[in-house]
Amino acid sequence: MKLYTPRPRELAQEHIKAYILEHDLKPHDRLPAEREMCAMWGFNRCTLRSAIAGMIASGQLYAVQGSGTRVAPRFRRTLQDLQGFTEYAADCGFRAETRLLSFSVTECDKHLSRRFRRCLGEKLYRISRLRMLNETPVLIETSYIPVELAPGLEEHDLVRGSLFAVLEDVYGLALDHGEETTSITSATEEEAAHLGIEPGTPVFWIVSRTDTPDGTTVEYCRTVGRADVVEMASVLRWTEGEIE
């Protein structure tokens, strides 16, 4: 069996990532000078610069004129948080942008019917949006919402505005709780084109459901997220001697 041998640029990137982890570098911390890194790992300057350029392009590093290369902040998504993307990104120090990829009306198939506990054929909005942070594409969110719950939703601004805010403020839907599962998959050609990565690149696959207090499912969402930019986090809380 032929073993895979990484290219020099890929190997240099692995060394940089390992250095960041080993030295517990935080966002905005500076990497050693290029000459020092070349000496540490035996790479020539051209290879190292190519590796750094690739990591800057993918949002893992950033360069400061006259101050070297620094670790880029990563977008940490907390699983228990129902806060909207734009507001959450701002709290993390990112400039958020949304692009509407598609907006259509579809029908409940067997899978969606189970998710929403609705009859086959009931109408659903299908809203696909590309989420960007500091001009870097990071997430593709595809939401399904029953038309019955939000008639005329297409008339609202879902690019500059918050979908959750519209559902709550305009339609009076209290988004109280939900459920989310996370796994890893590979980016399809279409997903990779939107996210600016290579097809087959490992990405997060996030499936979530958001309900009202009485258990009515308002949104079912499928999200594809770049694993090199997004971190998934969970919050543990003690409740009567047990961890939630």
Image (cartoon, helix red, strand yellow):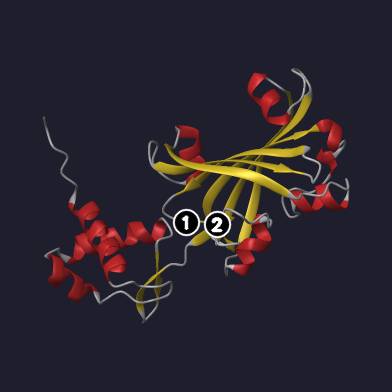
- In the visual, does 213 lie left or right of 206? right
Kindly identify the residue that appears in the image at 29 percent across and 61 percent down.
Answer: 17
Looking at the rendered structure, the kind of residue marked 1 is Glu
- The residue labelled by disc 1 is 231
Query: What is the x, y in percent for residue 178?
Result: 67, 45
Q: Quadrant of the N terminus?
A: top left
Label 2: state its secondary structure.
strand
Q: Quadrant of residue 148?
A: top right
Q: Quadrant of the C terminus?
A: bottom right
Kindly identify the residue that appears in the image at 72 percent across and 39 percent down.
Answer: 219
Nearer to me, 56 or 228 = 228
Query: What is the x, y in percent for residue 106?
Result: 73, 25
Figure check: 166 above or below 96: above
- In the visual, does 16 lie left or right of 171? left
Nearer to me, 217 or 171 = 217
Give neighbour class at mark 2: few <14, some 14-19, many 20+ (Cα, 10 Å): some
Figure check: 133 above or below 148: below
Figure check: 104 above or below 163: above
What residue occupies the far bottom of the structure in this picture?
66
Instruction: Kindly check if marks 2 and 1 are in contact, taking CB atoms under 8 A apart as contact.
Output: yes
Looking at the rendered structure, the kind of residue marked 2 is Arg
Query: What is the x, y in percent for residue 207?
Result: 58, 39
Nearer to me, 22 or 160 = 22
Query: What is the x, y in percent for residue 173?
Result: 84, 46
- The residue labelled by disc 2 is 77
Kindly identify the residue that appears in the image at 64 percent across and 56 percent down.
Answer: 81
